[in-house]
């Protein structure tokens, strides 16, 4: 055939393919979630999240250090709170001697070059498992919750956190957090705002990990309706105006259109959270021999980058890179 265009020429060898690759997946772009439990020498598997363990602080330091050796640069901490410490006021969330504050101090001291982020939301701390305070009718209270988040974030900042990551979806929390951080001398602490967090069915294994069951209702009065994308862009615009440093979309793969549209709207870095259910589905198929998890994850994470995300919160390092011996 006489063809002027033979696109396969550019696919001929691995070297050519990598030379013209439009998208890359640097390990430094992955943020690895870490579940922290009380005690020492604890490594407790999570049945619905194969390969991921809840770890006591000492074990987590070892694990994060190994992740660092493989090229990862950041971790986000989620505490597993003892049921006896959960309450209607969620006051354990700003305990300066609590699990999160202690973990932040010890991990930053041991691994000062790792970027340590901390989730800001009340769900591990409330007796009903919602991300906010509730009134007697089960309505999640916005402004009262924001006041709690501010106390929580200041405790985290005081413990050495690099970025706080509010995942609660209350209105106005980014500006409240930014102002409180600045007023208290924490100008250097950044905010990764979960701008577009959808009310998704893909968070199940995460709730298993934290041992959180919703006491009533669902999260649809604060997390977003999966039907909406303009609303996501508006949430992100407001978070940006309120001082967010990084804008996050969650979950990732079912919302690549949201990431791509947000990419066109903002000059800020975009994060995507490849959530627990997205990870668990692949691991379940892998366990059945139906696909190769490493290859699938590499393709999925690349597609999240291609859509426009700069960083990706993901459990895949547990399966893709050696975190264990
Ligand atoms: C709660 C929170 C959730 C996740 C991160 N922060 C669960 C929820 O909103 O119910 C989910 C993460 C995942 O599924 O991996 N603030």
Image (spheres, helix red, strand yellow):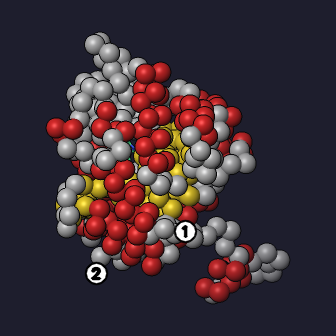
Residue depicted at x 44% and y 69%: 111
Numbered badge on residue 325: 2
Label 2: which secondary element: loop
Numbered badge on residue 207: none
Does residue 237 show up? Answer: no
Mark 1 crowd level (few <14, some 14–19, many ≥20, 10 Å Cα): some
Q: Are marks 1 and 2 in contact (CB under 8 Å)?
A: no
Relative side of 192 to 296, left or right? right
Relative side of 19 to 39, left or right? right
Q: Quadrant of ligand 1?
A: top left
Query: Residue 30 at what x, y percent from top left?
Result: 50, 63
Quote the CA–CA distance across marks 1 and 2. 21 Å
Query: Residue 139 at what x, y percent from top left?
Result: 35, 17
* Vertical position of residue 262 compared to residue 171: above or below: below
On the image, which quarter does residue 201 sit in?
top left
Does residue 65 show up? Answer: yes
Residue depicted at x 56% and y 40%: 184
Quadrant position of the N terminus in the picture: bottom right
Judged from this view, the residue extending furthest toward the right is: 4
Query: Residue 46 at what x, y percent from top left?
Result: 22, 57
Judged from this view, the residue extending furthest toward the top is: 137
Query: Residue 224 at what x, y percent from top left?
Result: 48, 31
Quadrant position of the C terminus in the picture: bottom left
Judged from this view, the residue extending furthest toward the left is: 84
Residue depicted at x 40% and y 58%: 105
Q: Which residue is mark 1?
A: 28
């Amino acid at each position: 055939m006489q063809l002027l265009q033979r696109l396969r020429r550019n696919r001929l060898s691995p070297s050519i393919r990598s030379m013209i690759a439009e998208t890359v997946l640097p390990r430094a772009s992955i943020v690895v979630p870490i579940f922290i439990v009380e005690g020492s020498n604890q490594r407790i598997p999570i049945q619905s999240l194969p390969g991921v363990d809840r770890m006591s602080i000492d074990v987590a330091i070892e694990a994060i250090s190994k992740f660092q050796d493989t090229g990862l640069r950041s971790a986000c901490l989620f505490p597993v709170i003892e049921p006896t410490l959960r309450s209607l006021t969620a006051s354990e969330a700003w305990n300066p001697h609590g699990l999160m504050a202690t973990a932040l101090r010890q991990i930053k001291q041991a691994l000062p070059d790792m970027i340590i982020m901390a989730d800001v939301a009340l769900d591990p701390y409330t007796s009903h498992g919602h991300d906010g305070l509730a009134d007697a009718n089960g309505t999640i209270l916005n402004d009262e919750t924001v006041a709690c988040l501010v106390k929580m974030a200041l405790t985290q900042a005081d413990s050495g956190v690099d970025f706080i990551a509010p995942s609660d979806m209350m209105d106005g929390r980014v500006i409240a957090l930014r102002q409180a951080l600045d007023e208290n001398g924490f100008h250097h602490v950044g905010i990764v705002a979960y701008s577009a967090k959808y009310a998704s069915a893909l968070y199940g294994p995460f709730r298993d990990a934290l041992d959180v069951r919703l006491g009533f209702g669902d999260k649809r009065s604060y997390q977003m309706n999966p039907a909406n994308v303009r609303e996501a862009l508006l949430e992100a615009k407001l978070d940006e105006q309120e001082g967010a440093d990084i804008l996050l979309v969650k979950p990732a793969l079912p919302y690549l259109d949201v990431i791509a549209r947000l990419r066109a709207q903002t000059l800020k870095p975009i994060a995507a959270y490849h959530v627990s259910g997205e990870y668990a589905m692949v691991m379940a198929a892998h366990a059945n021999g139906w696909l190769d998890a490493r290859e699938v994850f590499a393709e999925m994470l690349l597609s999240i980058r291609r859509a426009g995300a700069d960083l990706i919160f993901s459990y895949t390092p547990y399966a893709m890179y050696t975190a264990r011996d």
